[in-house]
Image (cartoon, grey):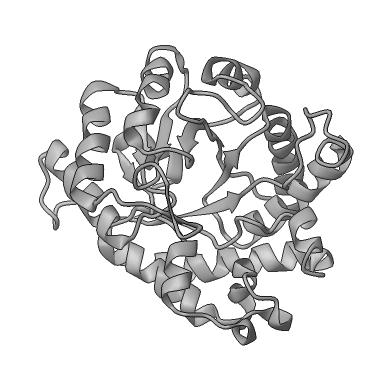
Amino acid sequence: MARQGFLEALSARTLVLDGAMGTEIQRLGPSAGDFPGGQDGFNDGLVQSRPEWIRQIHRSYLEAGADCVETDTFGSNRIKLDEYGMGDQTVAQNRAAAELAAAEAAAAPPPARYVVGTMGPTGHLPSSSDPDLGRMPLGEIREAFALQAEGLAAGGADALLIETSQDILEVKMAILGAREGMGRAGRDVPIIANVTLDRYGKMLLGTGVQAAYTTVRGMGIDAFGLNCSTGPAEMEPSVRWLDENSEHPVLVAPNAGMPENADGQAVYRMGPDEMAGLVSSFLDRYARVRIVGGCCGTRPEHVARLRDAVDARAGRGAGDR
């Protein structure tokens, strides 16, 4: 039987995305020597230096019931990789990450699992007048994402996720770059555009969900969503607006609650059952919500409860998917 495509699956059922990558990496207790060149904190570089760790993380989410696993490429656009001296390896780095995730997805039991190529922000804010953050030329931002998308598509990603976006102009550049990169790879996959909103429903530079969605909805995206920054409760007004106004499927991937400061570290205290209950309520009320997952602070336990909630709502047991 032919494998069902990502968009086919999305139209047929609610998909469960995985949870946080960074949290799981830290639980493995990495030291500077585990990262390429001893560059402590270079999480994406573990695809090369500790691929077995990243495989293990993907596997843990798949075993928890995730339909989709995200590549370890949040900071693998060329601009971010330049900070680690690896900008010239952007295509190869992303291809390797996608291939690694694809191998785990292919080994998982039915139903079909999908690899979502993660494309995080560059660290610049092109809409800003800030003399440092706002100075990066748009063409360079676009090309940084094009190289990333080329590698992800060539490596077998089933969709591209532009995520944790704080500047809607950068989102536009990422979409355009993704199209260019997929053209170079000779492989076209769906694009999901995600933005990050604060508790008041605004992106970092003040763009609301209405303006953000209106800006990109005609750019050939296949889904639109929200991730990071807040827990599910704070996302609800924006999710409601998208349900009423979006022409696209909606992705919702909140943090495990609002971050709390504990000795200078962000701590997320929302447990799996509470989070799954809140996200499940979105599925009951908002038909446009078609992908649910977790961001900061979420673990395989959170994904397992999301899986249970989605299956219960659909009247399925664990073996019926």
**From what the image shows, is residue 106 above or below residue 176?**
below
Percent from the top left, x then y, of residue 59? 37, 70
Instruction: State the residue at coordinates (75%, 36%).
Output: 125
In the shown orientation, is residue 26 left or right of residue 311?
A: right
Residue 73 placement (x, y as % from top left): 61, 59
The answer to which of 172 and 176 lies nearer the viewer is: 172
Q: Residue at x 60, y 22 (%)?
A: 212
Residue 63 point in image, percent of width and height: 28, 66
When asked about the image quadrant of residue 231, the answer is top left
The quadrant holding residue 60 is bottom left
Count of marks, rendered view: 0
Is residue 109 visible in the rendered structure shown here? no
> Which residue occupies 36% across, 18% down?
240
Which part of the image, by quadrant, shows the N terminus? Answer: bottom left
Can you give x and y, in whole percent of width and height, for residue 167 in the image? 68, 32
Q: Choose top left, top right, bottom left or bottom right for residue 298.
A: bottom left
- Whether residue 145 is visible: yes
Q: In this rendered view, identify the residue nearer to me: 202 or 165.
A: 202
Give the answer, above or below, for where 107 lies relative to 34: above
Q: Residue furthest bottom?
A: 33
- Tell me: 50 left or right of 245: right
Depth check, front residue: 33 or 308:
33
Q: Is residue 254 above or below residue 23?
A: above
- Extreme top residue here? 245
- Residue at image coords 40%, 36%: 252
